[in-house]
Amino acid sequence: MSTLVHSSARPLDSVVLAVVLTGFVASTYGFGVYLFANLVVDMRRDIGFDYTTVGLITGGAQIGFLLFSSVTSVISRFVEGWKISLVSTLITSLALLGLSVSDSIWLSGGLLILLGGCSASVYIPLAEIVTKGFSPGHRSRVMGLISSGTSYGVFINGLLVSFLTVHGGWRSIWLTAGLISVALCGVAWCLLRQRGAAKEGGSSPQRSASFERPTAWLSRPLYLIWAIAFLNGMALLPFQTYLAPYLRDELGVSVQDTGFIWTTIGAVGMASGFLVGWIADKVGVRASLAMCFLSAGLAATVVFSFNSIPLFYVAAFLFALAFYPVFGLVPSYIGQIVPVSRLTQAFGIANVLIGLGGVCGNFLGGFSKDLTGSFSSIYWVVALLLFGQCVMVFMLGKPPVSVTEAEQP
């Protein structure tokens, strides 16, 4: 089915492709989702808007994420995943450039909501691209590297803000981010075409053939991994959301220490995706998922059990060791149990569930704080959910020989 023949691909091309796909995530998440938070103060001063508007924009971006996740799952049956991901990154680039010249908060808000949606439509097809472009023994580490792309994007954000805010202002930062993304799209276009991705379903008959010869793809392990994806959002996202308020407002940790704890999460995250992905290629995705959930569960236990700065750094390390890899391991497992023609659709549903889990978890976490007066209840519930996911992982069962391989010549 696929003309992307793994054995004929040059190693250098594979490395470049992995870097480009990581750049997709760095651009759409690092720039498109997280850069606004760094520039909101300067943008408010020049454009003029209140924090209620900020809340509406960020909430709209989350709605955009869920909407684009759903739409991507549908259109993936008709359009190849690499095209969806590339076009979404191009739209991201244009939106970033648009923000550099916008003088209207309504236009800026619309572009930011669009960026939130594109972060979903870029990421979801990557599992399909990796499955077609890399041999089974390398897919988990590539997905792990890609899932850490957000860390690299946030790191670049810090550099851009540090160097350009004083010299060029906030508009120059959006402009630079947009130009970087445009250049990335150019490289990606050339590389994906060279590797034969454009030919894979080049004729729509191959895509439509999947309708004529339907392949069974729904299974108990898939339903279970979808449930795990929902719980990922419900447990891991609130852990991140409420960590700084818990440390600063309830435990009295200084701003500086809290900042360094967050820096630890980012620094470890830059390496953990590839590292855990490499382990997954050696010992299996299920074992690696279990290790991640155990690590994050221990991190949550440390947070609510102790009030010690050194132990908070340990918790940050354990959390970062799990947080970024998990979002690469889930699509890696789905790729082992779902035909490649259904992979983007299956992961799209998982992505929607992650988003819904995050919404539920953040809401219930805030409600719990108001009800009990403490953040600690959030973290012991998160720990229970994560330890429960460890058990669920072993209920998945060992995946068969990848069904995606059966579709390839």
Image (cartoon, rainbow, N blue to C red):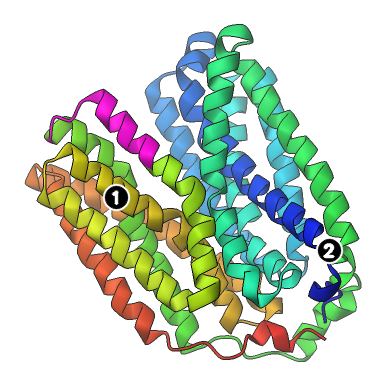
Q: Quadrant of the N terminus?
A: bottom right
Residue 266: x %, y % from top left? 43, 41
In this rendering, the answer to whether 167 lies above or below 341 is above
Crowd around label 1: few <14 · some 14–19 · many ≥20 (10 Å): many
What residue type is disc 1 on? Phe
* Mark in front: 1 vs 2: 2
Looking at the rendered structure, the secondary structure element under dot 2 is loop
User: Is residue 292 something that shows in the picture?
Assistant: yes
State the residue at coordinates (77%, 66%): 80
Q: Is residue 253 magenta?
A: yes
Comes first in the chain, label 1 or label 2: 2
What residue type is disc 2 on? Arg
Q: Quadrant of the C terminus?
A: bottom right
Residue 222: x %, y % from top left? 49, 81
Most frequent secondary structure within the magenta stretch: helix
User: Is residue 351 something that shows in the picture?
Assistant: no
Looking at the rendered structure, the secondary structure element under dot 1 is helix
Q: Which residue is mark 2?
A: 10
Residue 212: x %, y % from top left? 79, 89
State the residue at coordinates (50%, 35%): 34
Crowd around label 2: few <14 · some 14–19 · many ≥20 (10 Å): few
Question: In this rendering, would 139 be left or right of 155?
Answer: right
- The foreground one among 135 and 63 is 135
- The foreground one among 359 and 187 is 187
State the residue at coordinates (53%, 34%): 155
Where residue 63 is drawn, which disc sits there? none
- The foreground one among 195 and 40 is 195
Specify start and end residues of the magenta stretch as a single range.
251-264
Q: Which residue is mark 1?
A: 239
In this rendering, the answer to whether 92 lies above or below 342 is above
Q: In the figure, residue 30 lies in which quadrant?
A: top right
